Amino acid sequence: MVEKRFGVSLKDYNTFGIDVRCDCLCGFSSIDDLRELHAGGLFGSRWGVISGGSNILFTGDYRGTLLHPRGDRITETSREGDRVRLHVEAGVVWNDFVDYCVAHGLWGAENLAYIPGYVGASPVQNIGAYGAEAADIIESVETFSTDTGTRLVMAREHCAFSYRTSVFKTVLRGKVVITAVDFVLSATPSPKLGYGDLRDRVVSLGGPSLGAIRDAVTAIRKAKLPEPAELGNAGSFFKNPVVEDAVASELKKEYPDMPLYPSGQAGYSKLAAGWLIDRCGWKGRRLGPTAVHDRQALVLVNLGGASGRDILDLAAAVSRDVEERFGVALESEVNIL
Ligand code: EPU
């Protein structure tokens, strides 16, 4: 059922806690709801989607309609050998989906525990952490095409998934609404413990069970990342920059302790934006009502009462220093509206 509310404050709908309003907040639960909105001409005016609001920065009131997914069902659709398929509606909280998988003995989502946001947003920037990413377990993405007004299912090979991006962030941006994601999980244990101190933590929790991995990842995230309810933030504000190998090796010569990762793209390496920002002395530094988080320099925080512009000012100051010192441009991971 479509539910419209007008002149709504978005303070509780974005994890930065920015107090702006939108003209209309419109809850939907199904493709039929979106058909109804399409017939009513909604997609001819300004619209967007807001789910968990955990990767969005509002720089002013939103003059238009924000769609909010409400469908929250998880359905097992098939089981072949050890492969289990789940159809998960866009309004399911991501961490509830991870908990469902852990409770049902399904492997593949556990390293992505405690990432904020909803399932519908997970393919957009191909959320990732601790050596795993959503694309590893996504089989297809169910969408509603706002051009044709019909259901459109995108198979994973057409989603152009790569580091923190997908077709939903590029060519299909503003052209589809994600209504559900189909995942394929494995009933056979396949622990991924290669990242940082994950293995040690899992061992101390009794070995690589699904629950121990989920709990270890949750504990690491809680230790490094601020709780939005306490300190407004959107997780990593910047992407880790991907640079040409030649640039990376020049920097490595100058800064031997600089972390360097494979980018998955021949001829390019990935740098750690958090390290670059930290090295510029920004970790824990304040600027007006905003700051760079004191335990993870990739995270920008609202100390209370900040506007979106205040956060953008901080981001610009940080980027300027990183560019001056390392010659590397930072790109925002967060959607700026
Ligand atoms: N580092 C510093 N100082 C800092 C932060 C990091 O020196 O303040 C160094 C670390 O010591 C490490 C390197 O930078 O050598 C990388 O840091 P970390 O392992 O903490 O991971 P990250 O690259 O900062 C990425 C994701 C996170 C994800 C973690 C864990 C991006 C943009 N961020 O952070 O994702 O949780 O890896 O897998 O890729 C998010 O997207 O919101 C998010 C939190």
Image (spheres, rainbow, N blue to C red):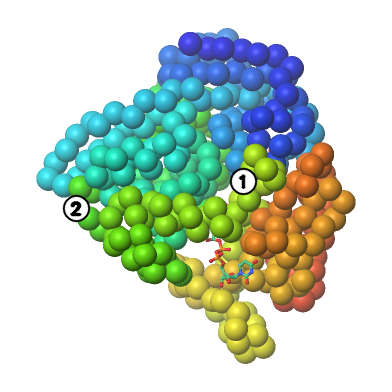
Name, please, the residue furthest toward the right. 288
Q: Amino acid at mark 1?
A: Glu
In the image, is 173 to the left or to the right of 129? Answer: right
- Which quadrant: the C terminus? top right
In the image, is 281 to the left or to the right of 269? Answer: right
Which residue lies at the image location 56% right of the left edge and 35% below the top edge?
Answer: 52
In the image, is 83 to the left or to the right of 328? Answer: left
Q: Nearer the viewer, mark 1 or mark 2?
A: 1
Q: Which residue is mark 1?
A: 227
- Residue 326, quarter of picture: bottom right
Q: Which residue is mark 2?
A: 188
Numbered disc 2: secondary structure: loop
Numbered disc 1: secondary structure: loop
Could you tell me residue 44's position as x and y percent?
63, 20
Indicate the quadrant of ligand 1 in the picture.
bottom right
Front residue of 8/248: it is 8
